[in-house]
Structures are given as C-alpha cells and as structure tokens.
Image: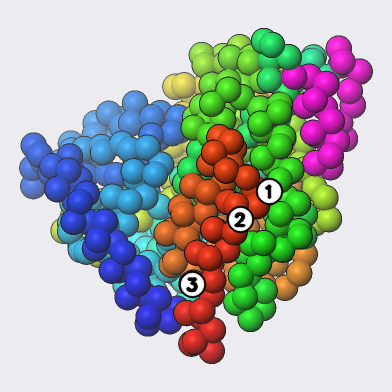
Amino acid sequence: MAVKAIRRLAGCAAAIGLTLTAGCAGAGTLGATANTVTIAMVSNSQMTDARELSSKFEEANPDIKLRFVTLSENQARAKITASTAMGGGEFDVVMISNYETPQWAENDWLVNLSENINETPGYDQNDFIPSLRQSLSYEGDMYSVPFYGESSFLMYRKDLLEQAGITLSRTPTWQQVADAAAKLNGPDMVGICLRGKPGWGEVLAPLDTVINTFGGRWFDENWNAQLTSPEVKRAVQFYVNTVREYGEPGAAASGFSECATQFSQGRAAMWYDATSAVSTVEDPASSTVVGKVGYAMAPMVEKPNSGWLYTWALGIPKSSDKKDAAWKFISWMTDKDYIKLVGEELGWARVPPGSRLSTYQIPQYQEASKAYARETLDSIEGADPLKPTVQPVPYTGIQFLAIPEFQDLGTRVSQQISAAIAGQKSVDEALEQSQQYAEVVGRTYQEQS
C-alpha cells in the first residue's frame, strides 16, 4: 500500500476520532477494571448470541471480565477505525472484516495472531474455509480470525413461487429475478427486498455484485473512473428500478437488518443478501417462514459466481494492554467448540455459518442446514476477490475495493445511490456525482504510477 494512502486513511480516522472517540472511550472503559476485556462488536444476530453465551467464557475464565460495546454496522466501522488508527486503547478486541484486516496489518495496527494460533491446542486454523483464511492474512500470517463467513445468494419463498407458477433455477439471471418480483409484488407482499441504506457496507454490498455481473467496474486498468460507463449505468438503473417498483417501503433506509425483518416476517417474496442471513431466516424464534425458503446462487448477467466474499472477524489492536486475555476470548468465540455450544444451547440454525469446514460435518448442523449449506459453501468457495469483474481492474475485492480510500469513497457513492432510490435524483445524476468522487481517488493512484 502506498505511503500516501496510509496517511490518508490515518488522517481520515483521526478526523473521525475527534468527534467519535469521546463517546467510544466512555462506552469502552466506564466501569472497566484491570482484568476487563472490552470488545467492540457489530449488533448482528450472531454477535447477540455470542454476548448471550459469554457467561460461559467468564465461568471458565473467572479472572477475565468481558465488556461489550455493540454498535450498528456504520457506527462500528467509524468508531473502530478511529480508535485503532489513533492507538486509543479503548478496545481490546475489535470486530473487523476482510476489508480492514490486510490494510491494518500493513499499517502495523493489529497484533499478528499466528503465534497465538499455533500455541492454542486444537484451534486448527486449517479448518477455516481457505478463501476466508487467505482474505484475513497479510504476508502469510493471520491478523484476525473469522467469526462467520458469507457470500451472497437469493432467498425466495418456495410456496409463493409455486402458487404463481414461477420456476427459478439454481443459477438464475437478474432478469428472471426481476420478472418474478413483478409477478409476486402486491399490496401485502413486496416482490423482493434489496438494500438501499447508505453505507459502503450496506447498499453497495449487493449493488457492487450487480455492477460486476453486468460487466461494470469502478476503475479501468489505468485508474480511470468508470462509474458513468454504459455497463455501470445499466446495472445501477436496473437495481434502482427493481427496488423502487417491486421492493420494500422506505427502501432508501433499509439495510440488512430491515430486510431480514421484512423477509422473516413474510412480507417479502424474495431477498438477495448475505448467506449468513439463514441464522435469522431459519430460526423459529425469529422467523415465520422457516422451511418455506428456497436458495439459489447470486443472480448473474455476464459474470458467473457473482456473489461477494465477506467475513466478520476478530482482531486485537496493537494498542491493547490485555492482549493475552483478548486472545483467550477470541479463541473461545471462534473455536470449533463454540460452534457446538451455539447449536446445543440456542439451536443449530443459529450457528455462525461459513467459517469452519468442520461445521458442515456436524450431523445436527447437516440436518438443520440441508436447504442452504451447499449453496453457502459453493458461493464462498466460488467467490474470487482477485478477479471480481468481467474486464480487468487494478484493485481486488468484490463488494468493496480493497483500498483505504474506499471507506470514504464508498460511503459518498452509496449516499448518491440511496438518493436515487428515494427518488431525490436520477440515476444519471447520482452517477455523475459519483464519477467525480471516483476521479479524485483515481488520480492519486495515477500520480503514484
């Protein structure tokens, strides 16, 4: 990574920190004692389960107390980035992804976990799905470990499609999905739920896979911005039209959590999103559609295997002064035994999916996941962040660009897309503004070459 890029990321984080770390520090350290491990986590369902089960860890490790700071995805990204980049020390464990991990490892912000992994009996890093393990590594060493992994796929109500006489293959096209959404859309049931909420990890996650499979890209090989290219325009117009015509009410403010509620409560006929959504969709405690859902690979146009690759993982900031205790907690939460604990205590449908190969060999989980396990594994293993697009590109990453500027660039572009979904501007206007943002980033890389 270029030195200028590292400085830009650190500078951005510092600017964020001026407004956020005061609240963050209070949340993380208030009431903490010398043996308290403070964990910053995203407030997704699997993380809520981990918090519920954390008393088991404290019982086994009476010398360690746990303190959780749970935040929405956008808040978590901002606060964790600010704290880690500035060496604030508020957090001993941070939940990050395969976007941050290699970059932060290169910046020397994270502890190299390879020694801890090798010295922990039975931890078995080779049991992690290879594509995830590689995505969380830098120069051959792991700097965070996966809690759960995901790609993306299409979830659909088998009963509703059958009633409507609609058949979808395991590898549908986006046009087939849009046609089905049109037939299934009605006053009490939307045809499809698609994210529209601003955030590079919200609306851009599914939208980027659509752009990729339509033949679009963010930059060409020479870092010339391509957000007004015919391929990108066609993809974004398709996405915006589909969600505006057949999508959920208030789509411009709907992210993963909102769509999970819509689909699980029987108010959407289809949903394209993360494979990890099965923990909600197939959980009788939170879903009314258990057993009624079919699963298909990410819809495609030109590029097959168009699903994303993502993992929520746990790392230790260099600034933590409780690194040993932090690793004890991380190794507990990402171990094979934790998978079994979730299944036995909370139900096998709530097991964190897509992280360990051995999960798919557990008989109880095989039974619980038979409707979606194959699609999940095929999607994760088929995703190729090194070749994310039809045409060649100078970056890696599928639903994000693995460059430090993408946190800001992606957020700005996502705001433009959300505005188009809300009907506040046209797709052309949104992409013209997005192109200007991308050109600024592209020029910095052109200057370095």
| Quadrant of image for the N terminus | bottom left
Residue 44: image x %, image y %? 43, 33
Residue 238: image x %, image y %? 74, 43
Say what amino acid the circle numbered 3 marks. Val
Whether residue 135 sits left or right of residue 327 in the image: it is: right
The span from disc 3 to disc 1 (Cα, nearest Å) is 21 Å
| Circles 2 and 3: CB atoms closer than 8 Å | no
Q: Is residue 302 magenta?
A: no
Q: Is residue 65 visible?
A: yes
Residue 251: image x %, image y %? 56, 30
Mark 1, other Cα within 10 Å: few <14 / some 14–19 / many ≥20:
many
| Circles 2 and 1: CB atoms closer than 8 Å | yes
The span from disc 2 to disc 1 (Cα, nearest Å) is 9 Å
SS for tag 2? helix
The range drawn in magenta is 162-185
Task: Report the residue marked by disc 3.
Answer: 440
Say what amino acid the circle numbered 2 marks. Leu
Identify which residue is drawn at 64% across, 47% down. 427
Identify which residue is drawn at 44% across, 66% down. 405
Task: Report the residue marked by disc 1.
Answer: 236
Q: Earlier in the sequence, mark 2 or mark 3?
A: 2
Whether residue 91 sits left or right of residue 303 in the image: it is: left
Task: Report the residue marked by disc 2.
Answer: 431
Circle number at residue 335 = none
